[in-house]
Image: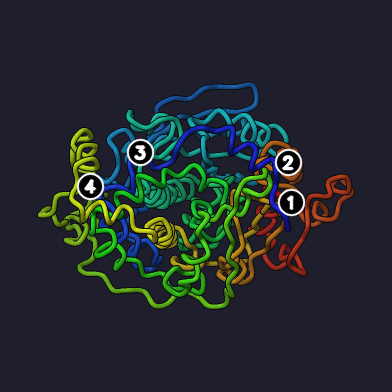
């Protein structure tokens, strides 16, 4: 299957660079990777977020057909891994759009934001308000860390400054989603599902792996890992590789210490397939030929195995009265004895590149540096974003994955499929690429929400989809009949 030319062209129009600050502070990477071991195991983190975690509504607007509640709470990540979040992101903000009149049950969908989706207006306008008007369904819109009101002052638009910021965002959203799921449950809303588009699909998938009950999940335009997004997808062209390579070469902590924390070892792991580096000499630009640019080779691997065992971690986290009373030593203890590149003044860093030692110059100029950086990027991305590195959702039959067949942003070649990781989930494909699906398939999303959950089976075969040739079912049977109450809700989300 080819790649969307629109995806490639659209990416070239955007001039922003990702990760201009580099990998992030080594101590931050260490702490978030150690914390990943906890939240990746659903049973071990049941007590991290109390059921009565405080949530506040501070504003309510009355519209013609709904109420719009603005709310907030303190991100649990700030309590569990203090200082890892930027100050602006500590307060988690959300909007809750509730219909004035319910049509039977009180279903709610939590929408996590995709890349560039700041504040709430886009999801409110395109998704939540139409859902209220046409289906009587409520929506809860959570603002991502590093976006909107939670965006650091030194961050340019949606371009995360450090690679570590993406992992901090993911860890925060997993815990914050648990807060909101507990809160909705205590308020009597049911059934509750989760969804998101692009990055929002990834984050909602991570959140569901941590929830101890069956829950509908509809991740749209996302896949099993974010590693391919930044190493072989069109977004890899936006990565500031020069800065990443310099830091990787000069600061030995990445190669000697951080890399030892990477535990994922599935068939698509950089540890298990050294061919990844060898085959990535062109930065994985398998899409460049679409616009007559030089290209490198792509890699396709046999993806048949699952992740290995999980490492044990030290003393547990104790939660009392909604606060941490005893934190993990490993999260707070970092090695401050070494001088780090990212801790030096910018001017000093620039001078260091110009007047550095011959040894540093040799490190920066070594031929394998770029490929090593790509391999390291794949390793750290898989560690925190690969679904095989987290618990399997309680009921995978409630998961419907919607993908674009020609998606150049979310490459599927060379990585485990979600069906291998989550047996029983359903995958459906839209014709076209990432951008066209987002811009021109919103009508399919809204159309599916117009029907009640009880008519889910008829929606799947109704003539209303006959003019929309974009939907292809991968699995042989629908599981609506097996789970009539929960799966029916999932079926009417983002078909």
**Visible residue check, residue 53:** no
Q: Position of residue 254 (x, y in %)?
A: 28, 58
Measured in 3D between alpha carbons, the distance from the residue under mark 2 to the one under mark 4, in whole angstroms, is 41 Å
User: Would you say the residues marked 1 and 2 are in contact, meaning their CB atoms lie under 8 Å apart?
Assistant: yes
Marked residue nearer the N-terminal end (4 or 1): 4
Q: Is residue 394 left or right of residue 83?
A: right
Measured in 3D between alpha carbons, the distance from the residue under mark 1 to the one under mark 2, in whole angstroms, is 9 Å
User: Would you say the residues marked 4 and 1 are in contact, meaning their CB atoms lie under 8 Å apart?
Assistant: no
Residue depicted at 60% across the width and 49% down the height: 294
User: Picture quarter containing residue 232?
Assistant: bottom right
Instruction: Nearest to the eye among marks 2 and 3: give it.
Output: 2
The residue pinned by badge 1 equals: 430
The residue pinned by badge 2 equals: 441
Q: Which label was assigned to residue 73?
A: 3
How many neighbours does mark 2 have within 10 angstroms: few (below 14), some (14-19), or many (20 or more)? some
Secondary-structure class at tag 1? strand
User: Would you say the residues marked 1 and 3 are in contact, meaning their CB atoms lie under 8 Å apart?
Assistant: no
Residue depicted at 39% across the width and 67% down the height: 41
């Amino acid at each position: 299957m080819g790649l969307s030319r629109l995806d490639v062209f659209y990416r070239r129009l955007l001039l922003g660079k990702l990760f201009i600050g580099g990998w992030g502070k080594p101590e931050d990477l260490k702490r978030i990777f150690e914390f990943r071991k906890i939240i990746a195991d659903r049973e071990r983190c049941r007590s991290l977020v109390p059921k009565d975690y405080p949530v506040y509504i501070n504003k309510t607007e009355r519209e013609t057909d709904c109420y719009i509640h603005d709310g907030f709470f303190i991100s649990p990540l700030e309590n569990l891994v203090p200082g890892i979040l930027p100050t602006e992101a500590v307060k988690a903000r959300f909007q809750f759009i509730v219909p004035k009149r319910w049509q039977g049950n009180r279903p709610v969908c939590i929408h996590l934001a995709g890349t560039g989706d700041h504040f709430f207006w886009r999801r409110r306008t395109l998704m939540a308000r139409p859902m209220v008007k046409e289906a009587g369904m409520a929506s809860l819109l959570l603002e991502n860390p590093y976006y909107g009101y939670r965006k650091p002052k030194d961050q340019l638009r949606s371009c995360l400054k450090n690679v570590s910021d993406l992992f901090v965002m993911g860890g925060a959203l997993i815990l914050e989603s648990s807060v909101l799921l507990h809160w909705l449950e205590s308020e009597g809303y049911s059934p509750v599902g989760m969804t998101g588009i692009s990055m929002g699909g990834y984050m909602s998938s991570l959140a569901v792996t941590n929830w101890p009950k069956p829950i509908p999940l509809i991740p749209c335009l996302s896949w099993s890992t974010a590693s391919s997004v930044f190493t072989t997808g069109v977004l890899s062209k936006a990565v500031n590789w020069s800065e990443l390579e310099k830091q990787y070469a000069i600061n030995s902590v990445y190669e000697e210490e951080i890399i030892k924390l990477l535990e994922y070892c599935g068939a698509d792991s950089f540890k298990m397939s050294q061919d990844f580096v060898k085959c990535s000499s062109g930065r994985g630009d398998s899409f460049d030929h679409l616009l007559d640019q030089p290209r490198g080779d792509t890699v396709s691997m046999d993806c048949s195995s699952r992740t290995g065992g999980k490492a044990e971690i030290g003393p547990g986290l104790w939660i009392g009265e909604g606060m941490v009373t005893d934190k993990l030593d490993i999260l707070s203890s970092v090695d401050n004895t070494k001088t780090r590149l990212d801790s030096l003044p910018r001017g000093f860093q620039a001078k260091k590149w110009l007047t550095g030692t011959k040894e540093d110059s040799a490190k920066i100029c070594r031929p394998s540096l770029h490929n090593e950086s790509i391999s390291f990027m794949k390793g750290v991305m898989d560690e925190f974003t690969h679904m095989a590195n987290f618990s399997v959702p309680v009921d995978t039959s409630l998961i419907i994955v919607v993908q674009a067949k020609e998606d150049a942003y979310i490459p599927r070649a060379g990585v485990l499929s979600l069906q291998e990781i989550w047996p029983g989930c359903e995958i459906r494909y839209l014709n076209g690429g990432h951008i066209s699906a987002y811009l021109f398939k919103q009508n399919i999303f809204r159309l599916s929400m117009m029907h009640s959950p009880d008519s889910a089976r008829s929606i799947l075969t109704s003539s209303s989809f006959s003019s929309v040739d974009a939907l292809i079912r991968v699995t042989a049977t629908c599981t609506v009949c097996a789970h009539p109450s929960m799966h029916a809700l999932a079926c009417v989300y983002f078909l």
